[in-house]
Amino acid sequence: MSMRTAFDLWPALDHRSKSSKIFSVAVSEDARILYLGLSDGQIEEHSIVCSQHGVRTSLRARKHIGKKPVQDICHLHSAHRLALVCDGQLLLLDQESLEGHSIPNIKAVSAMAVSPWAQYPPRIAVAMRANKRNARVMVYEVLVGADAGSPFGSSALCVSQANIAESLTIKSMAWLGQKVVLCTSLRYMLLQPTQGTSTQLFALAEDAPSPTLVQSIPSANLAVLLMDEVGVVINDSGQPAQSALTFPSTPIALAASGLYILAACTDGVHVYDRTSANWVQSLPYPPGVTPSPGQSIITAYNNKGSCVLFSGLQKVMLFQPIALDEQAKDLLRAGQFEQAINLANVCAADGAPWAETAFAQTALMLLHELRFEDAMRILPQCSLSLFQPMELFPLFPSVTAPWADQLPRKGYWGMHRPLPALDALLAGEAQPQTRTLLEQEAMQSIAEYLLEVREREGVDAADGIDTLLVYLLAELDDDSRLASFAEGPQQVTPDVVAGLLQRKGQSDTLAQLYAAAGQPAAGLALWKEIADENQGAEGEKLKRQQSAVQRATKVLLNRHAAPTAVVLTYLPWLISASPKHALSVLKTREVDDETGLKLVRGEGGSPDLLWRYLNYLVCQQGSSQTALHTELALTLADVALQLLPPPQTSGADMEASPASSQGHQAAVNQTGSPALAEVQGRLRSFLKQSSRYDARLVLARIRGSPLWQEQVLLHSKVGDDTAALRILAIELEDMVEAERYCAEQGLKGGQATHALLLDMLLHPGQGRPPMFAQACHLLAAQGADLDPLQVLGALSEEMPLSAGVDILSHLLCERLHRHRQGSIIRSLHKACTLSASVDRAELLSRRALTSEERACAMCHTRIGSKIFAVYPDGTLVCYRCYKKSEPNVCLVTGRDFIVSPAKSRERWPD
């Protein structure tokens, strides 16, 4: 039973002659001429006419070539010649007139092979005996028009010659690319004609059954080597190229045609697929053709593979290949889908245009066979110009109804019924469990296919495809891929799948689809609903709420996705749900200041959000409104006060204990949260930089609190240095900051602030003892800037003598040091003045003497009675040269007397 019909067998010719038998056959490239080589040395030319009803041949010409049988005959299409082997000679004949001549110096030819590729000029390889131990292979190029004097207009040029150490006769040969495969009765060899080298491929035992045989496959640049019942397929390197062919018996002859290898065995002709080595078809011999034992079968075929001839001694059979697309159709009709796809794959690699149609037709038929996975594995091989993914819409009419009028009407090969709904397709399955599994397989396979092809250029109804994908992924409960798909670029129509997604608990995904489809209000409403719900475990609920807020914020931030009206509608909810995200929306969307402040101050707002938004308006937007500056400072102060840790002692204790405030401030610094540190840092920075806020109002808000540094800044702003220094020196006991404050305020480190600080240290008040140690430290550091009398006046009568000694000793040491330092500086000034007077006197006492012979040091002109000038180093030049340069620079030496003045001890040259 045949797998498929690849060839039709037609009786072509019945040579009814008692005096001659058929020894060789050939066919023209266009399969219209049949050439017979006969046993009586004649050749016959027959025309071939093929039709649906059979093959008809008619004799056109007959030519006597020699007295011996025509052993081989080949048609040289590109040269319009025939090559024959007769009586051991190689002859070339004109294909029209059958006139020709033999190639000289060739005798005892045992085999011939013509290059099968479309080459001009064609090549002929001939094998003969060189001597008893060697065989010779010669390669000729057939040239047309090379010999004008020849009646045939042709000649052959020997292009290579190789002697091979082989005692056996070369029985057959075949071209394999640019090489030639040689076959004797015991071995196969691969010859490189241009180099004259040969390589043994296979060797058979001497008792191996005969015959050996080689057959080239021109379309694939391969060759088949016959070894008993096995055909080994090799490439041009001599290596096995694919699975071997296994024949039912040892073939008598082989032939090649396109994808197929035909083997003539004793029981008939068997056809094999050369790409897979699978058996395809068997055709029995017609009556009168069955070979008897020892009888050979002769084959011939054209390079196109459109005609294959098998001949016995009298009858010629013509094997006409069936079109490959028709073979694919036959396979599909027989339900042999895998074989049809394999055939289409092979033909698609060769560029067959019908292969894609075969893929689509097979996939549609597999859908009816409920083989969904196999069908969807095939469809991606179809181009979108042939098969559109929307052709699967009829399987899901409830989802794809809006695109029903866009469905293309394609019949392909007309071998399938129109696709029904998936439920109707599965109605024939009686088992509910099996039906459910098939439904899952169908949706999974179709979803995989749509995900693969949806991004290809030229997809029709992309919105319908994406909507169907969402439906399939939701029905499959593939939440991860559904979420990923919704986040990416897509064109889903959300209203079609809204009900399904809400039933599946995919409100978040539905909201994303609404937002992507240009319906932000619907999406934001769903996210608000998700964020406000209180169902489920605490962890899962918090995760859903955070995700909803983040996605809603992303939409609100996009000015192209959400208009301003939608933003203002959902900002109050976002302010309440997540002030951080609300602030980013307020900044990015540039909401009107008044509107933004109204929203932030309203219900749901928080002081933290308020100060951050005010900070954005004032510091980033550059608002100069005094009210906003003051509100920012007050809000920061209020937030800082709220974040302060509670004091560890009561208010009465704080007033009674001088160190209580300092201890509370230290506790704030050590245990304050990062939020408090951020707010305090921003408040201090703002109080320093801005001058538009009401400092007294802010000071009244924080007075009496542990925000001491902030109070210092505010007291400084209002000019109350006393209060500022009291906080630093008395409350905080931070002398470093107090001294720095004195250096920055008032007279920039002068007497006023330092004296005020000293008086404050000696008379702290509020029942506090004088801070003598700090006062001594201040005197040691800033004693030079304090008036001693003022210091003495500030000393208390009740001050202990030991403390007074320290203070007075500092004053006395400083004054004594100042007196001695002044004396030294005065003496140094006197010495410098005296030295300068001496130098001046000596320089003024110098005299310059000249004579009539003395010349200018610059231009070498005699001075004579001319005016001249003398530089401090004694260089003499004429007045004209002196005026050419700066008076303090010598023209001759280049010395600058301002930079390097002359000394009185320098002597003038004579």
Image (cartoon, rainbow, N blue to C red):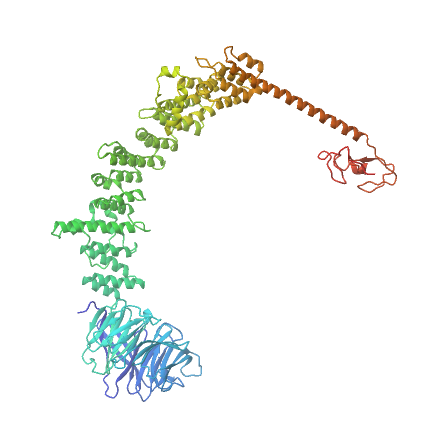
Quarter-wise, where is residue 158 in the image?
bottom left
Is residue 77 visible in the rendered structure shown here? Answer: no
Q: Quadrant of residue 334?
A: bottom left
Of 619 and 23, the residue lying toward us: 619
| Furthest residue in direction left, as rendered | 430
Residue 780 pos. (x, y %): 54, 21
Say above or below: 906 vs 771: below
**Where is the C terminus found, in terms of image quarters?**
top right
Q: Residue at x 21, y 46 (%)?
A: 476
Q: Is residue 847 above or below residue 812?
A: below
Pick the front one: 381 or 186: 186
Relative horizontal placement of residue 311, taking residue 164 as reference (left or right): left
Q: Which residue: 26% across, 50% down?
A: 448
Residue 520 in view, yes or no: yes
Q: Residue furthest top?
A: 797
Q: Residue 803: x, y in percent?
A: 51, 16
Q: Position of residue 559 (x, y in %)?
A: 36, 35
